[in-house]
């Protein structure tokens, strides 16, 4: 059960920067569209994609170290998991 909890925690921590960025950019674009009364549906996609890409570049090393530490921890504890 602890392993499942750690896996879910790592998954949420890895997804959070990209999801929060997409949420904030989408909110800003929606506010801009409401203020200017521009009703273009495709207007929000490009800023979201660019913002998520920038956040992925910035947080990439941290995300890779987090998942590699989790994988290393998982592989080192395989004998304990099989022995249960």
Image (cartoon, rainbow, N blue to C red):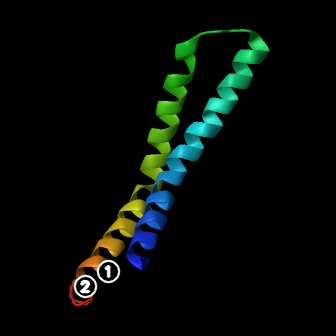
Q: Position of residue 34 (x, y in %)?
A: 75, 16
* Residue behind mark 1: 73
Residue at left offset 45%, top offset 64%: 8
Query: Dividing the picture into quarters, in which one does residue 1 lie?
Result: bottom left
Which residue is rendered at x = 40% and y = 70% of the image?
4
Marks 1,2: beta carbons within 8 A: yes
Vertical arrangement, residue 68 with respect to residue 14, above or below: below
Secondary element type, mark 1: helix
Does 82 sit left or right of 31 as displayed? Answer: left
Image quarter of residue 78: bottom left
**Label 2: few (<14), some (14–19) or many (≥20) C-alpha neighbours in 10 Å:** few
Q: Which mark is residue 63?
A: none
Where does the C terminus fall, quadrant-wise? bottom left
Which residue is rendered at x = 56% and y = 17% of the image?
A: 43
> Residue 50: where, in percent of width, then height?
48, 33
Q: Could you say which is closer to the camera, residue 66 or residue 73?
A: 73
- Mark 2 lies on a secondary structure that is helix
Q: What residue is rendered at 29% in x and 77% in y?
A: 74
Residue 40 percent coordinates (x, y): 59, 10
Residue of label 2: 76
Instruction: Classify residue 72 as left or right of residue 24.
Output: left
* x, y percent for residue 41: 56, 13
> On the rendered structure, is 57 left or right of 51?
left
Cα distance between the residues tagged 1 and 2: 5 Å
Relative depth, front residue between 76 and 36: 76
In this rendering, is residue 60 above or below 45? Answer: below
Above-or-below relation of 15 to 82: above
Q: Is residue 59 above or below residue 33?
A: below
Looking at this view, name the residue that lies furthest to the right: 35
């Amino acid at each position: 059960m602890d392993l499942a909890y750690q896996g879910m925690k790592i998954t949420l921590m890895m997804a959070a920067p990209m999801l929060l960025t997409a949420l904030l950019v989408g909110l800003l674009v929606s506010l801009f569209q409401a203020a200017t009364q521009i009703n273009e549906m495709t207007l929000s996609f490009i800023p979201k994609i660019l913002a998520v890409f920038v956040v992925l570049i910035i947080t990439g090393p941290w995300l890779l170290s987090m998942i590699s530490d989790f994988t290393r921890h998982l592989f080192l504890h395989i004998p304990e998991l099989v022995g249960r």
